[in-house]
Image: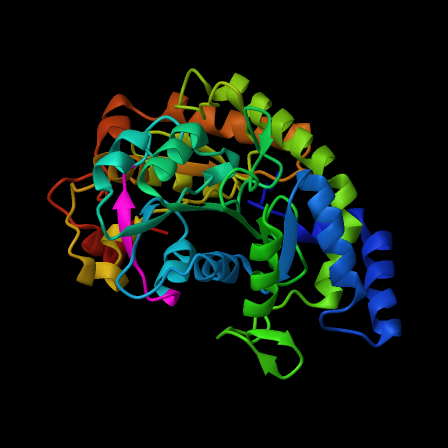
Amino acid sequence: MKVPFGNLKAHYHAYKGEIDEAVQRVLDSGYFILGPELSKFEKEFEQYLGSGHVSGCANGTDAIQLALAACDIGLNDEVLVVAHTAVPTICAIRSTGAQPKFVDIDPATYTMCVKDLESKITEKTKAIVPVHLYGQMADMDPIMALAKKHNLKVVEDCAQSTGALYNGRMAGTIGDFGTFSYYPSKNIGAFGDGGAVATGSKENSERLNMLRNYGQSKRYYHDTEGINSRLDEIQAAILSAQLPYLNEWNVRRREIAQRYTEGLKDVVETPVEREGSVHVYHLYVIQTDNRDRLIDYLAEQSVQALIHYPIPAHLQKAYAYLNYKPGSLPNTEKATQRIVSLPMYPELTNDEIDYVIESIRSYFTNCSQEKQTTESPLNAGTQSYEVAAKSGSIS
């Protein structure tokens, strides 16, 4: 049996009729940018979130940039964010001219550690970007309390958590802004790039709509500096066709996660779901020692596993100028040495899930004690992330 990490082809064929009809409708209309399909999807996504206003944009990275720009975040401002995230989160912050300041994670949930967050706030801090990673929301109540205390803006990065709940509230509806990615592999994905920003403020929404379209209040009237970041009509139509199925897909992801957890909880560290939260499992991430050997073994069994993410942002070469050193974010660095992402998408069959479970269990059964306890290059304390990457031990 072969189990790929994802299967977008299977997803398309499962919903081919609705998607093909949506695309054809746009092609027949001859209206491709800022048209009725975008307006329709924005309204539908507003209804899905249950509150606020939604502005479609070109991708999830732009969504964060636009939200920060709408908060007047710019040069010399500091934005607090975790280093354990996809680097596009950091790219978005830098696109405003602001500097990221990294916060460690809660080792159980992989989301922002509130205690460390509080210690990082300075007079230069202007915003917090909590990343709802892997499908679970950050601990938003204390984050919002700190933001209120220090007069900070909060921009939720919901790229991996569309549909997740925190104490009954939807991801993207708690902070000043919620930002979403519709990259094809997300819980709801476009057939290309796409993103959106949600806000509870009509005034903020109007500003976002200008910022995404060159700063225009109306055609050729530029009231502010903006960028070109628009969700096109074809992608909006495809998203509208899929949105009615999103809750069903998230339920299936949770079923898959439960099956994984039941089969693996005695051999690896399985995900922890925060009390009061609903995790939507964009990714199912386990932890184990010697994870590189496990990934290689799974590949031999035709199971594709990945690492999200092997090198945290504060230790990436691109951000060396920020002068973070190994050991500065201990929870983050420990997690990135041990995490493994297993196949996770709604079209996975129970037989495929069970095969992944059996393959992992056979790895631990067949490995000798010596082989299990030998450190991988990335675990060796004397070897840097850079050296490990060059050696090929990080994929």
Does residue 230 appear to the left or right of 285 in the view shown?
right
Q: How is the image coloured?
A: rainbow
Q: Is residue 82 above or below residue 203?
A: above
Asked whether 253 falls inside the magenta stretch, the response is no
Which quadrant holds the N terminus?
top right
Q: Quadrant of residue 373?
A: top left
Q: Is residue 66 above or below residue 154?
A: below
Q: Quadrant of residue 78?
A: bottom left
Residue drawn at 54 percent across, 68 percent down: 211
**Residue 382 shows in the view:** yes
Asked whether 101 falls inside the magenta stretch, the response is yes
Residue drawn at 32 percent across, 32 percent down: 113
Does residue 45 appear to the left or right of 121 in the view shown?
right
Q: Is residue 125 above or below residue 134?
A: below
Residue 185 position within the rendered picture, expressed as x and y whole percent measured from the top left: 59, 50
Residue 45 position within the rendered picture, expressed as x and y whole percent measured from the top left: 70, 47
Q: Which residues are magenta?
A: 95-104
Does residue 240 appear to the left or right of 306 in the view shown?
right
